[in-house]
Image (cartoon, helix red, strand yellow):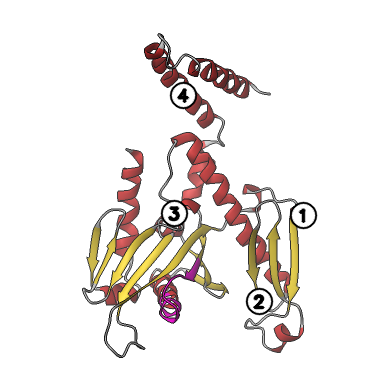
Amino acid sequence: MDYLEQELASVEEKISETKVLLGTDLNAEAETELQKLEDQKKSLIFAMQPPVEKIEATENFRSIIIEIRQGVGGDEAKIWSSDLLRMYSRYAEIRNWKLEVLDDGVIKIKGEGVFSEFKFETGVHRVQRVPMTEKAGRIHTSTASVVVLPEVPDTFVDIKEGELEWQFTTGGGHGGQNVNKVATAVRLTHKPTGIVTTARQERTQEQNRKIALSLLRSQLWEINEEKKRAQVTGFRDQIGRSMRSEKIRTYNYPQNRVTDHRINKSWHKLDTIMNGALQDILQELPQILQVENSK
């Protein structure tokens, strides 16, 4: 046990001892001392984190994985998921970023500053519009969930082979007859967490294995980073797994408006936004949310 670990253990012991005094004649003094000890604990935990340059480097990830899954709304939710995928793909083309399809509803985008712009897109995206199949002209509400993960280097996450369970089946990707005859599709399970990733778009099993492992590595990194932030800050961040079920944005077609509920701000010209004109949202949103998180 190194010095910082010893100090942390000592502070945690003092916290336990001080909590015993709460509710006694020394309650006021105990509350004051407890606050000081909690602050010391946070400082020690922060000091035990990886070097600052490594943490800051996460903002500079040049490759991200976006996964979009339909939510409530039946067939309209499936169409909405495809619309979101097209919107992000069009924005990547506008920015001259490299786009790669990894699986159904899963894409990878490479480019300078891509993670910094996309990291707040994780959450539930809701649409209000009249579906093409709606004959009575009624407005329906459907949802899709978006998950944005950085593609992280091997050195960022330690994954042991014994923790992995591989399954292989015939796929249905763009490899022609080969994927229908050979077991190229991959299903990877991380036994300690139960996380499952799949890949089937590539022609060979080896290529799909690499994709499935990369997807898993990104999800494990996200879990680890969220734990670190929670320890240091003591509250939930605006990114990460905790945001996946949060309704973050509504796309209202009758009113030609997009509203982000986290900052209570709307943008108009919905048709151009859905065609990839996301720059105002993606570049403004991180600035506002990062200021809010720092308060």
Residue identifier under label 4: 38
Kindly state the secondary structure of the residue where label 3 is placed: helix
State the separation of the CA atoms marked 1 and 4.
38 Å
Residue identifier under label 1: 161
Q: Residue 281: image x %, image y %? A: 31, 62
Does label 2 or label 3 sit earlier along the sequence?
A: 2
Does label 1 or label 2 sit earlier along the sequence?
A: 1
Does label 3 or label 1 sit earlier along the sequence?
A: 1
Look at the image and give the residue range highlighted in magenta.
Answer: 67-80
Does label 3 or label 4 sit earlier along the sequence?
A: 4
> Mark 1 is on which residue type?
Glu
Residue identifier under label 3: 243
Which sits in the foreground, 67 or 210?
67
Asked if the residues shown at circle 3 and circle 1 are in contact, with their CB atoms under 8 angstroms apart, the answer is no
State the separation of the CA atoms marked 3 and 4.
26 Å
Residue identifier under label 2: 202
